[in-house]
Image (tube, rainbow, N blue to C red):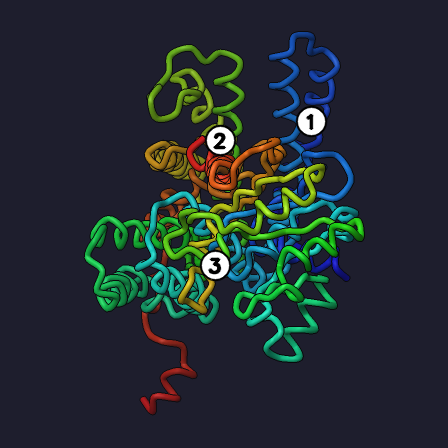
Amino acid sequence: MDPETKRLLGLVGGILVIASIIGFILSRRARSEAAKATIANLNARIRSWWVMAAIFSATILLGPTFTTVLFALLSFLAMREFITLTRTDRADHEVLFWAFFIILPLHYLLVGIGWYGMFTIFIPVYAFAFIPFRRVLTGETKNFLANTSRIQWALLICVYAVSHMPMILALPLRDYEGENAKLLFFFVLTVQLSDVLQYVWGKTCGKRPVAPRVSPHKTWEGTVGGIGTTVLISSLLWWATPFSPWQAGLMALLICLAGFFGGLVLSAIKRDLGAKDWGGSIAGHGGFLDRIDSLCFAAPLFFHITGFCFGTGMDPRPPAWILEWLGR
Amino acid sequence: MRSFLAALVRLATGVRLLPATPHGTGPAIYFANHASHMDFVVVWAALPDDVREVTSPAAAEDYWAATRLRRCIACELFRAVLIPRKDVNRGNHPVERLGTALEAGRSVILFPEGTRSVDGGTMEFKSGLYHLARRYPDIPLIPVHLENLSRILPKGSRLPVPLIAQARFLPPMQLLPEEPKPVFLARARAALEGTEHP
């Protein structure tokens, strides 16, 4: 493990230790029932953070294959929550089977073998066409457009967007060869820090809601304070990235803004479907989608902007063994 | 072995383990809406470990006794009570068979609709639940509302879609003295359906 990775891990560990101590002190001090409930939720969140940070760090250290599998699993669980809450009909059943068991694994297989050209178009071109093709075979026209769109959105958000995170590991960047794991770490850390700091700023001095009907707890104070602090912290982490300090700050700002809107969009969808949380799998947080909602839109944006500004160009051709097999 | 299998079923379907049964201890009749082949396994897996050990699901004899393997799974693994759906006579009557299990101190899981519904809605109840309730008026009847099972494995499909299922255990009910059969069956169905849109 190189010293910079060690420093990043140490930083996350340090933050969690401090958070746990603060959570413990607060739980001793809370008097009113409402305060106790808030602190109990806070501590449940912190405990879940320990688990999530441990799993994420361990897989990053185990290498790209494990990271890809982890994100494939995350996509699966997220899409499961998404489709469970979304209205679908009997005629969508076979399409859904394909989405979960064929399209998702194939897409992550493309991540795994590093066939970038097919990775970028597999879901937007092939799956996009296949879903209505398969659905039209059932002969059912009721809710045709609505349901095919729902499934396409599910794939785009939960699979396509999320898969850009493991793909960061394969992004060729100038003077940064073999160090991409740190960039992925930087990205995830920035989004999650921004979530946490927006929560902390919002809880302590949040007053004016940004979009009360979409997300009642998001306030202007929380958003500006949280994003500002995150940009500051992330720009101080520039040494782990291919960026200079001010570039790291700008990238963090981009990630935070995309994350902020991503969170709002997923919240709007959730409310449209009549739910408060996507699920109940992670104590204190809700479902998996509640935890990764701000990563979804930020990941492809971060991937492409980093690639455009700092990359040496992805190779769209199939891997050599496929070319050989095709006899070319 | 059984609690491991139940944990596996809960992991696959997203059904939560019930901390305690709503009626306390002792035998009970769990009745649920029927939408998929997995229904009895899901209710069975959601029960607390000690309760599950003394609970027998009802399973259709024509399906579950058709091959040796199925019979073994149904009878040895789930300790199911096999229920005939055709050629019912006094000797193999479902109420008799379920009654034998209840008298032995076991709880039973049954599906009063008799067959799986196609659209996921709850159909009219067959009279079996009424006859069982009349014969054992002291045993509580517990409605279990299953959600999303019809989307996971609907009738007519062999392909499962991995959605998150729910098993809601509702407050126990009982047959009232002198309650006519249609009134009771309608009330039981309403109790089961009542939470579809909470």
Instruction: Residue A232: give x, y in percent of width and height.
Output: 48, 28
Q: Residue visible at 72% across and 62% down?
A: B79
> Can residue A176 be seen at all in this image of the molecule?
no
Q: Is residue B113 above or below residue A131?
A: above
Label 2 Cα crowd, 10 Å radius (few <14 / some 14-19 / many 20+): many
Mark 1 or 2: in front is: 2
Q: Quick one: label 1 or label 2, which is nearer the N terminus?
A: 1
Residue picked out by circle 3: B115
Q: Residue visible at 34% across and 88% down?
A: A326
Given contact means CB atoms under 8 Å apart, are the residues at marks 1 and 3 in contact?
no
Q: Amino acid at mark 1?
A: Ile
Q: Which mark is residue B114?
A: none
Chain ID, mark 2: A
Chain ID, mark 3: B
Q: Amino acid at mark 2?
A: Asp
Given contact means CB atoms under 8 Å apart, are the residues at marks 1 and 2 in contact?
no
Instruction: Residue A157: give x, y in percent of width and height.
Output: 37, 49
Residue picked out by circle 2: A195
Q: Check disc 2 and report its element: helix, strand or loop.
A: helix
Residue picked out by circle 1: A18
Q: Residue visible at 41% across and 51% down?
A: B120
Mark 1 or 3: in front is: 3
Residue lying at the far top in this picture: please name it: A32
Name which quarter of the figure residue A200 lies in.
top right
Q: Check disc 3 and report its element: helix, strand or loop.
A: loop
